[in-house]
Image: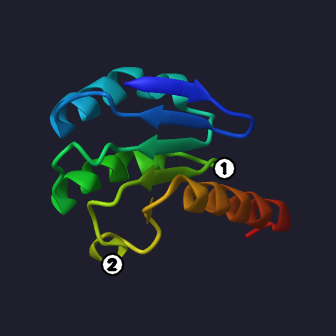
Amino acid sequence: MIIEKKENYTLISSDENSFSDFYTSFLKREKEFKKEHLVLLISDEINIKKEEFSLFLKSFKKKKNTSFVIVSNNVNSDDVPENFNIVPTLTEAEDILEMEAIERELGF
């Protein structure tokens, strides 16, 4: 797992060979990111099933007043809950972070 602190969020990238290894690494360090906006960049090299993305729902629900976005080309956003942010590019993830920041400022 590669962790990069950006200006407005923390980018966590997968360097593991399997989803289970990446998820295990993430869980071990999840508490470190409790108050941070997170973007998880899951490598296209990892074969991931749509059901495995749901494992992140628990982490997503814990995040209060922060954003949580997954970047992956391996899942259709229609296959996950509407309020769960999965996008195909990092640029789109950054756009979601900006939109959610604006919503929080406006009290939504």
Tell me, for residue 65, which label it has, or none: 1
* Above or below 91: residue 38: above
Query: Judging from the image, what secondary structure is the residue with disc 2 in?
Result: helix
The part of the image, by quadrant, that contains residue 79 is bottom left
Q: Dot 2, how many residues are within 10 Å of its Cα: few (below 14), some (14-19), or many (20+)?
A: few
Asked if residue 35 lies left or right of residue 56, the reply is right
Q: How is the image coloured?
A: rainbow
Tell me, for residue 86, which label it has, or none: none
- In the image, 106 versus 97, the foreground residue is 97
Residue at (47% x, 69% y) in the render: 83
- In the image, 89 versus 93, the foreground residue is 89
Image coords of residue 43 (percent x, y): 32, 43
Residue at (28% x, 48% y) in the render: 44
Residue furthest to the right: 106
Query: Judging from the image, what secondary structure is the residue with disc 1 in?
Result: loop
Q: Find disc 2 in the rendering and name its residue.
A: 78
Image coords of residue 20 (percent x, y): 17, 35
Asked if residue 15 lies left or right of residue 91, the reply is left
Q: Dot 1, how many residues are within 10 Å of its Cα: few (below 14), some (14-19), or many (20+)?
A: few
Between marks 2 and 1 in the image, the one whose residue lies nearer the viewer = 2
Disc 2 from disc 1: Cα separation: 24 Å
N-terminal-most mark, 2 or 1: 1
